[in-house]
Image: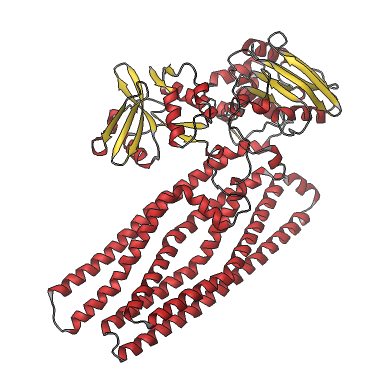
Amino acid sequence: MITANFKNIYTYYLETNNISLIDVNLSEFLADNELRSYETPTDFLDALQEEGPDVNLNFFGNKLIPVEIIELVNSENFGFIIFKKNGSDTVPYLLERKDKAITEINLKLNTVKEIEFSKFNENDYCFEFEDLNAITCIVNESNYVSLLNTEPDAKPFKKLVSFLRLERKDIYNLLLYTLIGGIVGLTVPLGIQSLINFLQTGQVTASGIVLIILIIIGVLSSGVIQIIQLWIMEIIQQRLFARTAFDFINRIPQLSHKVLSKYYPPELMNRFFDIVSLQKGLSGLLIDITSSLVQILFGLLILCFYHPVFIAFTVFIIVIVILILKLTFEKGLSSSLKESKFKYQTANWLQQVARARESFRMYTQGSFELNKMDSLVSSYILARKKHFKVLVTQYIAFIAFSVLITGGLLIVGYILLMSETISLGQFVASEVIILLIVNSIEKLILKLESVYDILTSVEKIAQVATLPIDNIRNQLRINYKLPITVQINGLEIHNSTYSFSLNAEHPSQLIKLQSRNEIDAFIDYFYKVKPERKGEILINNINVSKINKYTLNANTGIFSDRELLFDGSIKENITIGNSKIKDEHIVSFFNTIGATTFINSQPEGLNTEVLGGLYSAKQEFYRLLILARTLLKEPRLLVIDDYLLPEIVNSQKLIDYVKTNLPNTLIIIVKTNTHEI
C-alpha cells in the first residue's frame, strides 16, 4: 500500500517553480481527501497524471536502476519521487539535492531528513517494481513562464537574452571559466618572456626550471578549463532542447483557434528544428567568441604596459572592429532572416505536394509544382547570395584589418627593440601576444555566421513561443463526480437558434440540422473554434469559457471529423495516454458494438502501427478508432455526429453500450434531415 499527502506534493512543485498557490486555487482543489492510498506505484502515478494538469503539473513514470538515481539527483533542478519499503508498506519519498546534501521528504508523514551526499545509499530504495520506481515532474511553463518572455516584435538579440535567461547561472559559470581560461592562456607568452630573460644570462637556474614547470601547468590548466567549458555547454544544450520541446508540446494544444487560423500548424512546428542550429552556434558564441574577445582585450592590455604607443593601437583596433560590425551586422542579420524564410517556404511546399500528391499526379504532370519549386529555390539562392556577400565583405575587412595590425605591431615592436625601449623578452612576448590576437580575430571572423544563425534560430523559435495561448488562470473547476446539468442557450446556426437543457431526467437531445455545414458549425461551439458566434453553453450554470479547460476537456467527448489519428499504435490512438483504459476494455468495446472482425483482422492486434496522415473521416478504420477513443474515455458530456457512425457498427448494440457503461453521461446527437439514425 502506498499512502501520500497529495497537497504536499503539489505544493512542493508549485512553490519550487515560484507559482502562486492562490493562482491555482490549490486549497479548493484539495479541500478533502488530501491523504490517499494506492495499491501500486502505477496507480499512484495514474492519480497524479489525472489531477496534475489541473494545477499545471505533468508527472512522468521512470524505471531506473540504482546508478541512475545518482545521476537524477545530480541533474534535476528540483526533486523527484521514489519509493522505499517500510515493513509491509511502500512509502513515497521526495529527493532533492541541496549543495552537498540530499533532502529526503517523507510524503506520507511529511518529515524531512538531511543526508550527506557521500553517505547517500541508492540501494535503500525499491527497484523491484515492474513498471516504474521513480516519478519526475515538470511544470506546464507556458502557462506561467514563457520560453521567450518578450514581445513578438522585439529585436532578435533581446529574444536571445530572454531565451537564455533560465540558463543564466550556468552561462555565468561558463563565462567565468572563459575569463579564467583567457587569463591563463596569456600566462604562456609572459612566461616565455621571463624564460628568455633567464636564458640571456647563460645560466641554468632553479628559477628557470620552476618557470618551465609553471608554463606547462598553465597549458594543462587551459586544457582542463576547456573540458569544463564543454561539459557546462553540453548541459546547457541538453536543457535548451528539452525546454523548447516541452514548451512547444505544451503550447500547441493551448494555441487559440483564432491565432491558428492564420497559420498551418504542422508547417509552423518545423521551427522546432532551429533549436539544433541554435545548439551548435551557441557553443561557438559562449566559448569561442567570448574566449577570443577575452584574449584580444587582455592581450591588448598587456601590450599597453610595454609602451604607451601600444595604447593608441589598442584604441584604434577597438574602434575599427566596432565600425566594421556597425556597418555590416544589420545587413547580415536581415539577409540571414530572408534566407531562413525562403528555406521554410521551400520545405512547406514539399510538405504540401506530399500531402496532396494525388491531385498533383492527376492534374499537373509535374509542371506546376516544379515551377513553384524553381521560384522558391531561386528566391532562397538569391537571399543566400546576399547573405554570403555580407559575410565576404566582413571577412575581407577583418583580414585586411588583421594584416594591418600585425604589420603595424611588428614594426612598432621592432623599432622599440632597436631603440632598446623594450627588452628582447618583451619583444618576443609581444609578438606571441600579437599572434594570439590575430588568431582570435580570425576566430571571430569564422564565427560571425554562427552568430547570424543563432539570432535567426531564436527568431524562428519565437514565431511559435510568442504566439498567445488560452488563459487558464483562475478558471473554475466542476466536480464531475456529481450529477451535472448542461444548458444550451441561443446557439445560432445559419439564422436558426437552438436552446435546450440536459440533466438526469432528460439525459439526451437529438438535433436535426439541414446540412453538413450546419453540423460543423454546431460542433464548433464545443471546440470553441469561433467564440464570436452568438449563444452560450453552461455546465452547472457556469459558462464553459470560465471552466478549467483540462477538466472540461477530460470530461467531454466529441465524435466528429475534427478528431484525427496520429502516427502510433491502435492502442495509443484510442487511449492517448489514459492508463485507465486497458487492452481488455478496448477489445470488449469492439466486441460489444459488433466490430469484432475489425480488431481480429489487425496483424498485430492493438499494437498495429497507424500512419495518421493516411486516414480520413470517410474510412471505416478511422471512424472506429475515433468512436472508441470518444466513448472509452467515459465522458460526462458526449456529442455525436451521427453521420460519421461506422456502417459496420450495430446501432442498437451501440445504444446498449452507452446505457450500460455511460449511465451518467449527457448526450447530444447531431444529424441532418437526410440521414436517419
Q: Looking at the picture, how far across and down is residue 653, in whole percent? A: 69, 13
The outermost residue toward the bottom is 419
Say left or right for 632 vs 170: right
Q: Which residue shows up at 42% across the image and 53% down it?
A: 171
Q: Is residue 627 visible?
A: no
Say left or right for 556 vs 224: right
Q: Nearer the viewer, residue 442 or 317?
A: 317
Residue 257 vs 464, above or below: the answer is above
Residue 239 vs 571, above or below: the answer is below
Q: Is residue 124 visible?
A: yes
Q: Which residue shows up at 71% across the image and 19% down it?
A: 649
Q: Quadrant of the C terminus?
A: top right
**Colouring rule applied to residues:** secondary structure
Q: Looking at the picture, how far across and down is residue 669, in whole percent? A: 75, 19
Say left or right for 596 vs 313: right
Say left or right for 459 vs 210: right
Q: Nearer the viewer, residue 86 or 631?
A: 86
Q: Nearer the viewer, residue 494 or 569?
A: 494
Residue 260 vs 38, above or below: the answer is below
User: Which quadrant of the structure image shows residue 5?
Assistant: top left
Q: Nearer the viewer, residue 126 or 352?
A: 126
User: Which quadrant of the structure image shows residue 253?
Assistant: top right
The outermost residue toward the top is 505
Q: Which residue shows up at 30% across the image and 78% down it?
A: 429
Q: How many marks?
A: 0
Q: Looking at the picture, how far across and down is residue 499, in whole percent? A: 79, 19
Q: Looking at the picture, how far across and down is residue 21, in whole percent? A: 49, 30
Q: Quadrant of the N terminus?
A: top left
Q: Which residue shows up at 46% across the image and 16% down it?
A: 33
